[in-house]
Image (cartoon, grey):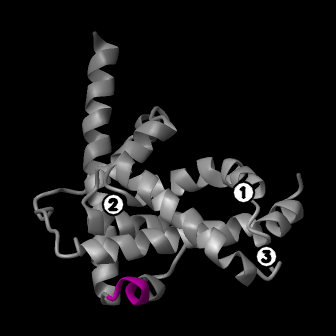
Amino acid sequence: MTENDLIKGCLKHDRTYQQALFQRYAGKMLTVCRRYARHEMEAEDLLQDTFIKVFSNIEKFKQKGSFEGWIRRIAVNTSIKNYQKHSFQKERIGLEDYEDETVDPEAISNLSEEELLTLISELPDGYRVVFNLYAIEGFSHKEIAEQLNIGESTSRSQLVKARKLLQSRILDMQKIFYEQEED
């Protein structure tokens, strides 16, 4: 089934085509949702909400740009709305004591994609959302500020703190890695 066949079938509300579309894109979109969710069940809920919106609004897809990109944008926006609804924006942890240390590039290269995603998912909500929007989705601080209804300086600050916290956790993993090599 081609992408156009899927779209046409979904426009007719044909369950067979809806299921095929879901199966084709659910894995990739679940990965997007996981980056914004606090846990797996929340990611699955975000995925479900994403596809409800996709099926409800498929007639708005104008064949301009990538269909997968259109679905991805819905997944990101659904995740942001969920974040705003739960309002974890005031979350703070003390990072003032973290020193900027150099992370050995080999320590980063020894991290699997799953380990890196786990480190990102463990960030406090505000840090994680800003980090994902900036570092992975490519939004500017101005765009992030508008989407999350925060100041640009808050976006920058959240990103800096996210990076420091990730750096600290990678350094901890680096120490463990080198200790294991010595044994």
Give the Cα distance between marks 1 and 2.
43 Å
Dot label at residue 163: 2
Residue 25 locus on image (x, y percent): 67, 53
Point out the stretch of residues depicted in magenta. 145-149
Query: Mark 2 or mark 3, which is nearer the start of the sequence?
Result: 3
Residue 161 locus on image (x, y percent): 26, 66
Residue topped by disc 3: 65
Residue 143 among those drawn in magenta? no
Q: From the image, state whether disc 3 or disc 2 is nearer to you.
A: 3
**149 up-or-down from 25: above or below:** below
Using the rendered view, name the quadrant where residue 173 is placed: top left
Instruction: Report whether 131 appears left or right of 19.
Output: left
Q: Secondary structure at mark 3?
A: loop
Q: Residue at x 38, y 46 (%)?
A: 40
* Amino acid on which disc 2 is placed: Arg
Instruction: Report whether 109 appears left or right of 7.
Output: left
Q: Nearer the viewer, residue 161 or 58?
A: 58
